[in-house]
Amino acid sequence: MSLALSVALERPGFRLTVDQTLPADGVTAVFGPSGCGKTTLLRCIAGLERPRGRIVLDGHVVHDDADGIWVPVEARRVGLVFQDARLFAHLSVAGNLRYAARRSGATAAERDELLELLGIGALLRRAPAELSGGERQRVAIARTLLARPRVLLLDEPLSAVDEGHRREILPWLERAVAELRLPTLLVTHNLDEVVRLAGHLLLMDGGRVTAGGRLTEMLARPDLPLARREDAGAVLEARGVGYDARHHMSELRCGSTPVWLAGEHVPEGRAVRVRIHASDVTLALESPGATSALNRFQGVVETVTAEPAEGRCLVAVATDGGRLLASLSSLSRERLGIEPGRRVWAMAKTVALV
């Protein structure tokens, strides 16, 4: 099954036009500038807006102009989590969860699974006013999931909490969406959230989708606006190989290339993502000798995108472990003769990897 959208919605000074088929499970991040239509798209899917076109959620047609189909909000089984938790203030955490379970028929076992997944079992007797921002948002997510949605829509769910609470929520949210395998759309302005949670990425601008695809491919495309951000970089898929307790470092494999990650214990066999900023990647024409940069990828230059006004360029390098981006000065590029097809070594310190 998949999430199929073909919608158009007009407002004064704005037009939304989206025609996409999204993955059946996992998280699709919707990313773009304010006012580009991200939240409006979620409202169309939820039934809070009535666009022209057709929407199919998990194999169920909920909107089709041609056939006169319009399923109302309450019958769509769409879970929508907003920036603010919107819990019932007069009910305890347990009461908020009971309300959702009664409406959907969710079982006690389902509730207990969510309590464990989101780490909120100790909060049941508390009132919403007694919870931290991070706790409130985890309870709101649990209440939404207890409604047994076909699709989960997250509209900047972490934007209203501070950085400390964001770090608190992310691991729980990551675990919940991974284990429940719901088709999920995440609207966010935070690229770290995208990297942590999403497997698929849609870029929006001016009410339309400008690009879409697998996250690892999208982040490493030098032709997209993401590559012009200060935090531009690539995400590589890796797997744990071993742990050096003496130096507090994990050894990973990206393809056949060994990669070292400092300060993290990645268990053997665990799949992880490693993010490397373009500004942290150094290129060399020959195999490097003794250097503090332990992470070394052999590769071939795919593209060079020059930015003359800034005196720099962005180099895309194809390696065995995936595509890397490197930000170089135009002088370095000239001296090294960096051009498409050139074989190079791409290096990054262990402390530069996230």
Image (cartoon, rainbow, N blue to C red):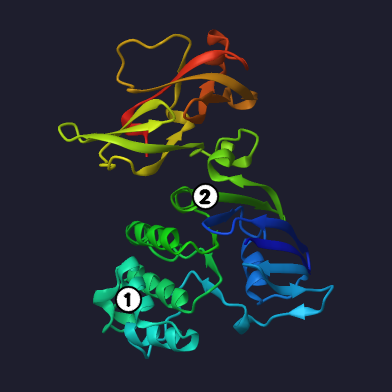
- Residue 89 percent location from the top left of the image: 39, 86
- Eye-nearest disc, 2 or 1: 1
**Residue 114, relative to residue 347: is it above or below?**
below
Position of residue 249 in the picture relative to residue 13 (left or right)? left
Q: Residue at x 52, y 57 (%)?
A: 27
Label 2 is placed on what type of residue? Gly
- Residue 74 percent location from the top left of the image: 60, 84
Q: Which residue is mark 2?
A: 199
Judged from this view, the residue extending furthest toward the left is: 246
Q: Which secondary structure lies at badge 2? A: loop
Q: Which residue is mark 1?
A: 112
Q: Residue at x 51, y 71 (%)?
A: 82
Disc marking residue 135: none
**Residue 211, relative to residue 329: is it above or below?**
below
Q: Residue at x 32, y 76 (%)?
A: 112
Judged from this view, the residue extending furthest toward the bottom is: 90
Position of residue 245 in the picture relative to residue 196 (left or right)? left
Q: CA distance from mark 2 to mark 1?
A: 27 Å
**Residue 19, relative to residue 331: is it above or below?**
below
Mark 2 vs 1, N-terminal side: 1
Label 1 is placed on what type of residue? Asp
